[in-house]
Amino acid sequence: MARKFLYLVAVLIVLVIAGAIALNVWSKQLTRLALVPTAGFVQQPPLEDNAYRDPAMWIARPGMGAASPARWQPAYRDEAAPAPVAPPGETPRFAVFFVHPTSYFDRKTWNAPLGDAEANRIARIYVKGMASPFNAASEIWAPRYRQATFGAFLTNAPEARQAIDAAYSDVRQAFRFFLASVDPDVPIVLAGHSQGSVQLLRLLREEVAGKPLARRIVAVYPVGWPVSLAHDLPQLPFPACASADQTGCMMTWSSYAAPADPSQIMDIYAASIGFDGKPRGEGPILCTNPLTGGAGGSAPASANLGTLVPNADLTSGELVPGAVSARCRPDGILLIGDPPAMGPAVLPGNNYHVYDIPLFWANLQRDVERRVAAWQAHR
């Protein structure tokens, strides 16, 4: 009986090892199978011309007061730590247009219905954690939109492109309403994450480049989406930020802990078409360092003014100084050192994509305030 038991244990160990190997080898395929829709793409009807006049179409907008998730100011874990917000009146007026990342993971449809309760709940959490570093702004706008489902970014199928295009139509309409609503003398900061950055980069090319509006843009933060140095950046109206007080520039990064394996995303990205119409290939992507405010380079954890460490359900959190470092790898991946304890949303390959902004929350808050002040000083 003992021998049979040992044989059973041996068989189970072999099965577990084989399963682990299979999961490692087939993880990309399994992820796509679980998240990429198999249904055909359904064209989204256009929104009403005045759709974004409705306050319900905005997760954050002026007039919401403390009810706006973007106005949240997390506390430091150490109560003695200084608050990073500039004193009232010291930061010039500026308006922020923020596009939230993907919060719809259903594979039933390629685009999220506006009334999807779970997608809306998650989007609000994302705005609270990712738009709040911009809370020194006089206005923060974050629209709801019929976002492409998460699986659309795991495939190069034509339906995926159609879904992303459909989402862009909503974002563009929201952006035009935002511009019509903001004082024309107020400078603007554009920000987003992941899918929000995809939509933001297209806005730059189609709605900002070559127009007087470009002079009002303090900085652009299309965080968490690869920007090819060879095939994307030259086609955009703004360069990478080279210094912490530069204006009219872009800050973006994609965060990975050690050992980093970005192939899940970068394999698809390499096969995609750049803004210049050519395949992006395996060339480096843009990495601006959120701890230094410039392109490339490295900074120790001591330079990190505060990482927003979330609670278990991501509805709140606290700022922890010195939690992670930041180093731009030659290929453009931002390395943050050993895996920090941020929660369960770490993606395969030690991809801290969901935490790109929270990892550097306090530094980003200082970064945007500094650039707005520099923009105002030059004018």
Image (cartoon, rainbow, N blue to C red):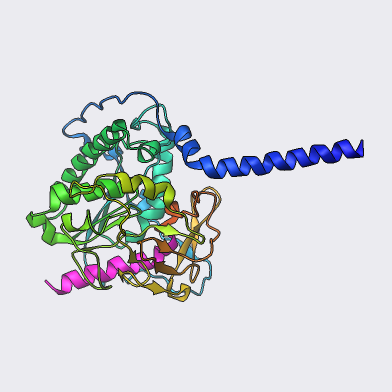
Say above or below: 49 vs 348: above
Q: Where is residue 29 in the image (x, y as percent from the top left)?
A: 47, 37
Residue 15: which quarter of the image?
top right
Say above or below: 355 vs 120: below
Residue 21 in the figure: left or right of residue 35: right
Q: Quadrant of the C terminus?
A: bottom left
The stretch in magenta equals 358-379
Residue 302 in the figure: left or right of residue 166: right
On whether residue 361 falls in the magenta region, the answer is yes
Q: Quadrant of the N terminus?
A: top right
On whether residue 252 falls in the magenta region, the answer is no
Depth order, front residue of 136/126: 126
Depth order, front residue of 248/159: 159
Number of numbered discs visible in the structure rendering: 0
Depth order, front residue of 361/235: 235
Say above or below: 38 vs 258: above
* Residue 66 at least partly seen: no
Instruction: Name the residue at 37% across, 24% down.
Output: 39
* Residue 324 at least partly seen: yes
Instruction: Name the residue at 33% across, 52% down.
Output: 225
| Residue placed furthest toward the right | 1
Q: Main secondary structure of the magenta part?
A: helix
Residue 299: which quarter of the image?
bottom left
Instruction: Name the residue at 24% across, 41% down.
Output: 171
Q: Position of residue 114 (x, y in %)?
A: 33, 32
Q: Where is residue 295 in the image (x, y as percent from the top left)?
A: 29, 68
Residue 185: which quarter of the image?
bottom left
Q: Where is residue 344 in the image (x, y as percent from the top left)?
A: 54, 49
